[in-house]
Amino acid sequence: MSSKTFMNMLLFIFTFVLPCLVGLSNGECDFEAIFNFGDSNSDTGGFYAAFPAETGPYGMTYFNKPAGRASDGRLVIDFIAQAIGIPFLSPYLQSIGSDYRHGANYATLASTVLLPNTSLFVSGISPFSLAIQLNQMKQFAKQVKEADQQDTKLPSPDIFGKSLYTFYIGQNDFTSKLADIGTGGVQEFLPQVVSQIASTIKELYNLGGRTFLVLNLAPVGCYPSFLVELPHNSSDLDEFGCMVSYNNAVGDYNNMLKESLKQTRESLSDASVVYVDTSSFLLELFQHPTSHGLEYGTKACCGYGGGEYNFDPRVYCGNTKEIDGKRVTATACDEPYKYVSWDGIHATEAANKLITYAILNGTYSDPPFPFQQHCDIQPIG
């Protein structure tokens, strides 16, 4: 079966079959807005609103131009918005053209959960950590409640109890120091990371939030960039070419996060606090891409160098540099829909769509959270 045929089959099932099975009426959804907190995996333009520097081929698949996203097209948060029938989320930091009637996106590329102790211009870590994103959300809520309700670009003051709160953050806390201090060093401060996420949920609960989806940490041991940059030997690679030790460390963090969210759920009895195991599904895509209509797991679509990973840390996707006396450009492949990895660090639109299907189904969530019980799922083609 070709990749396009497989994707069309999935689209048919989620667009026509499932809504019929669950019997929901057209266009209804329990959630009128999404408020998202995250890093580049869910940033829809916040970072580049603050630090304009984006270039192609990012955005080539869906938007046909750079659109503030670290992918060739749409992200998981984009597909979730489409699925529940609301527009793409406007970045909180975007001053022109934003519409916040259906939520806001606080995520920025390179963000961390913990406050950074360095500068963006030194380490590449965003200044907009989770604590800053939470403060932005509090300010937004305050302004909404004080605003003239004739403002057509803001939601109604009661929106906060009718919204979905999503988290896709923590990867940079885990990976930014891996090369220097190893998995053992990183694991020492990961309890602080999960604690910060839990306390943020409780603060959002006090603002009226009642439904929280927390996506866990991806299997970075399969990422082309880390396979190239992180120290390892061949004995650390599994049969699929992923680094076992790093993925085991990811598993330890995810178990810690899952337990923390369980405790948070117990303390907020009238809230839904959902742990979403996107890591397991993404690992499946890396290990068995052809089983899901893709072809390449641990090879980047956009990069330089070819070979097994098509990733060179000296020249990132879309950039041109002089290497070994030769001017080279990290270009995009012709068929990104065949790849899991877009640029060695982030997923392709095709992978993001498959991940979203898994999230909507609810089987990768604890407790199970099938979206079909809350919304009439809309097409996300």
Image (cartoon, helix red, strand yellow):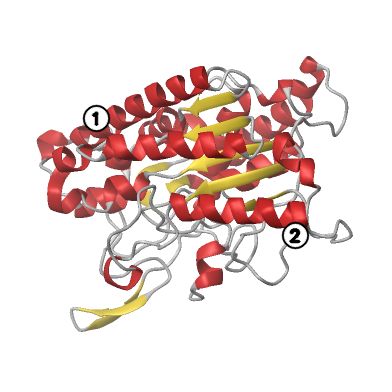
**Could one spot residue 267 in this view of the protein?**
yes
Q: Nearer the viewer, residue 236 or 335?
A: 236
Does residue 16 appear to the left or right of 313 in the view shown? right
Q: Nearer the viewer, residue 187 or 310?
A: 187
**Could one spot residue 3 in this view of the protein?**
no
- Which of disc 2 and disc 1 is earlier in sequence? 2
Q: Secondary structure at mark 1?
A: helix
The numbered disc on residue 248 is: 1
Q: Amino acid at mark 1?
A: Asn
Return the x and y of residue 43 as percentages of the image width and height. Answer: 53, 55
Return the x and y of residue 42 as percentages of the image width and height. Answer: 53, 50
Residue at 58 percent of width and 39 percent of height = 204
Return the x and y of residue 206 as percentages of the image width and height. Answer: 60, 36
The numbered disc on residue 99 is: 2
Return the x and y of residue 241 as percentages of the image width and height. Answer: 25, 38
Q: Nearer the viewer, residue 83 or 301?
A: 83
Q: Nearer the viewer, residue 324 or 156?
A: 156
Residue at 31 percent of width and 42 percent of height = 220
